[in-house]
């Protein structure tokens, strides 16, 4: 199975150097621009597999597991292996629903005639809240001036 168009576009636009594909066969045109590694789900879930990459792409065939195993694969990819994780799911809610994807921190990034794609990006996962700035913290310059 060749790389889908949304994955190829993501690799090219973000200029990702290291990509880990689970359930895909890398294209030669994309493989020349970046280092693409193919791995099976069983190898990915080994405790000794801790290779950090820029993007992990999980195909629908890699996610055809029971709920607990599927969530374990997604959690390991998201929490330990990469800052970006791309899920490929079919249009029907056979595997994962949109609510389950949103609950895991994924946002829908592409939709084709057969598949929908969800992306987790650690940098855009949670916006910085308004209260998290020095304006609302303790001000050491006022410690001896005012009684709180």
Image (cartoon, rainbow, N blue to C red):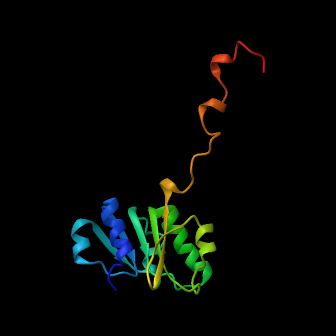
Quadrant containing the C terminus is top right
Quadrant containing the N terminus is bottom left
Q: Nearer the viewer, residue 45 or 8?
A: 8
Q: Nearer the viewer, residue 115 or 105?
A: 115
Residue 140, image quadrant: top right
The correct choice, above or below, for 88 with respect to 81 in the image is below
> Outermost residue toward the top?
145
Q: Residue at x 67, y 17 (%)?
A: 142
The correct choice, above or below, for 130 with respect to 126 in the image is above
Residue 117 x, y percent position in the rendering:
47, 74
Q: Residue at x 36, y 78 (%)?
A: 4
Q: Residue at x 58, y 74 (%)?
A: 71
Residue 15 x, y percent position in the rendering:
30, 60
Total tally of numbered discs in the picture: 0
Residue 118 x, y percent position in the rendering:
50, 71
- Horizontal side of residue 36 vs 89, given as left or right: left
- Horizontal side of residue 39 vs 99, given as left or right: left
> Outermost residue toward the right?
148
The correct choice, above or below, for 18 with respect to 99 in the image is above
- Horizontal side of residue 29 vs 45, given as left or right: left
Q: Nearer the viewer, residue 21 or 115?
A: 115
> Outermost residue toward the front?
113
Residue 11 x, y percent position in the rendering:
33, 66
Q: Residue at x 74, y 15 (%)?
A: 146
Residue 25, image quadrant: bottom left
């Amino acid at each position: 199975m060749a790389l889908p168009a949304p994955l190829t576009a993501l690799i090219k636009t973000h200029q990702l150097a290291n990509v880990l594909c689970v359930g895909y066969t890398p294209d030669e045109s994309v493989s020349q621009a970046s280092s693409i590694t193919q791995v099976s789900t069983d190898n990915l879930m080994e405790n000794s597999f801790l290779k950090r990459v820029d993007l992990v792409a999980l195909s629908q065939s890699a996610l055809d597991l029971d709920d607990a195993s599927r969530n374990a694969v997604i959690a390991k990819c998201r929490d330990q292996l990469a800052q970006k994780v791309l899920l490929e799911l079919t249009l029907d809610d056979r595997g994962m629903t949109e609510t389950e994807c949103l609950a895991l921190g994924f946002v829908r990034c592409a939709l084709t005639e057969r598949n929908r794609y969800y992306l987790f990006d650690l940098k855009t996962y949670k916006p910085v809240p308004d209260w998290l700035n020095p304006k609302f913290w303790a001000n050491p310059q006022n410690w001896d001036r005012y009684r709180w």
